[in-house]
Amino acid sequence: MAEVLVYVDHVDGAVRKPTLELLTLARRIGEPVAVALGSGAENTAAALAEHGAVKVLTHDAAEYADYLVVPKVDALQAAYEAVSPAAVLVPSSAEGKEIAARLAVRIGSGIITDATDLEAGDEGPVATQSAFAASFTTKSRVAKGTPVITVKPNSAAVEAAPAAGAVEALAVAFSDKATGTKVTARTPRESTGRPELTEAAIVVSGGRGVNGAENFSIIENLADSLGAAVGASRAAVDAGWYPHTNQVGQTGKSVSPQLYIASGISGAIQHRAGMQTSKTIVAINKDAEAPIFDLVDYGVVGDLFDVVPQLTEEIKTRKG
Amino acid sequence: MSLRIVVTVKYVPDATGDRHFADDLTVDRDDVDGLLSELDEYAVEQALQIAEDADDAEITVLTVGPEDAKDALRKALSMGADKAIHVEDDDLHGTDAIGTSLVLAKAIEKAGFDLVVSGMASTDGTAGIVPALLAERLGVPQVTLLSEVSVEDGVVKGRRDGDSASEQLEASLPAVVSVTDQSGEARYPSFKGIMVAKKKPVQSWDLSDLDIEADEVGLGGSWTKVDSATERPARTAGTIVKDEGEGGKQLAEFLAGQKFI
């Protein structure tokens, strides 16, 4: 069976959920061979084996942390040359897409980004993507070279499928260009204890209607009652009420959770671009004419300062 | 010595229009107005600020696209860019990201550059990979997804705000930079800027000017193939209730019914 390279997104050996989803999708088109780089790479092996990796190629060097992107491209290229895979799959993070793109040029291949599904086809893997603020669904494939495909979080349910997961050291020779962009300082983002926005099963977002940074606690309380991530519209971010890293929309993050709750968000096309593929959509807005209500499975026309706290209390009561 | 800045921009269909695909599954540009991609306005703005801080700098704005794409160049010129290059060729129709990066890289090399500035992504394709592709093809450092950028003494510095950390980056010129919508509000063209822009030079290059063969680009030469594009079925109308004191409880009931609680 053909081997499929899967690039592993991990934090000090803790594998992030989108990579486990990727292993599930990879098994549809071949045998997953995982590539884990940087600090703690070897510690990823158990989780990767549990989810279907037949082999785990690992390599650690200071270059991965000290320089931007290119050392990882060099390593993924080394893995590509060692394995000759039928496809290369990478999580669709900002960095993941950059790594995948540069690899594609190097190996003379086409690239598909932000796939939301993947299946085997007669002429190679077929990727589903959404286009134009999720108003269209396309099916595409790579026509030249070895398919390089990046896949969005929440594109598949994680399935366990124990495999050998034998750890092998990957030999990597860094290119001259690897040290071109130096990372001179790194400030880790403070953990909120909430799920990562792009990976969360439930996202609760606030917009212009929240009317002030101090009021975002209402949105956070609702999120916490549901174990959800917090999102914000561009209007709320531009007003300085919530960090840009939580922005949902065309210029922020694209989310596709099981449940999306929009509070005080009118639903401009730029916001819809980032959340329209959510499975169930709920909105709370004073304006009955707000375009967000065209998308919802359930909408409440009302003041979020009344509705959201009542909803939060009711959820807490029901959860006991 | 003059700092040569090339800003890559894209002419995109207006997101508020009725965007759809043409019969050949490329983006239909006939039925919807086009404009300079909003995310590229931030690139033009940062290029202008970098040029203002330099002793001597020249900004060339570059696009690959059909005849109408000149509108995007004019907008950038009216904001303050010095000159423009339009790569236009019938054989470019349907070119994908890898092909576009080839054309852009050849044009950037022909124009000459110390710094390339791009937006973080286009507002139509939204992949966000062209800046990295350009760095790879040009063989220069990528300093991408910056919310802050500055250039001094041949070194570009910037801040990249990622999911798990905020990083300070540094690279020697020449380099490729991309900036986010957090880099700073883009200026509006002044009336004077618009009038002056009409007299600024716009060069037109085609594939032969860049030594690119027709089969390396376009729909036929594309590295990817779109097999189908289907309009998402309209959502069935949801339940909408008016809050008369029990809106939160009613919503909780709905969420419980859907097994979210």
Image: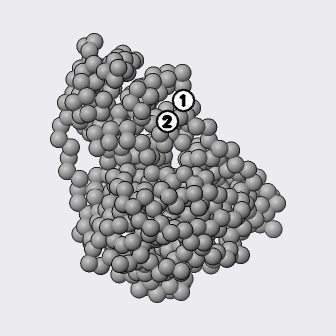
Quarter the N terminus of chain B occupies = bottom right
Q: Are marks 2 and 1 on the same chain?
A: yes
| Tag shown at residue A131 | none
Return the residue nearer the eye: B136 or B76. Answer: B136
Residue at 54%, 21% (x, y): give it: A214
Q: What residue sits right under mark 1 in the picture?
A: A241
**B16 or A111: nearer the viewer:** A111
State the separation of the CA atoms marked 2 and 1: 18 Å
Q: Amino acid at mark 1?
A: Trp
Badge 2 vs badge 1, beta-carbon distance below 8 Å: no
For the question of whether residue A95 can be seen, the reply is yes
Is A7 on the left-hand or right-hand side of A157?
right
Dot 2 alpha-carbon crowd within 10 angstroms: few under 14, some 14 to 19, many 20 or more: some
Q: Nearer the viewer, mark 2 or mark 1?
A: 2
Q: Earlier in the sequence, mark 2 or mark 1?
A: 2
Q: Chain of mark 1?
A: A
- At a point 21% along the width and 30% down the height, the residue shown is B257
Which image quarter holds the C terminus of chain B?
top left
**In terms of depth relative to the viewer, which is nearer, B178 or B33?**
B178
Give the residue displayed 32% in from the left and 42% down from the top: A258
Q: What kind of residue is marked 2? A: Arg
Residue that carries the numbered disc 2 in the rendered image: A194
Can the viewer see residue B89 in this picture? no
- Residue B108: x and y, percent? 61, 73
Q: Position of residue A316 (x, y in %)?
A: 37, 20
Q: Residue furthest left?
A: B236
Which residue is found at the position 54% from the left and 42% from the top? Answer: A245
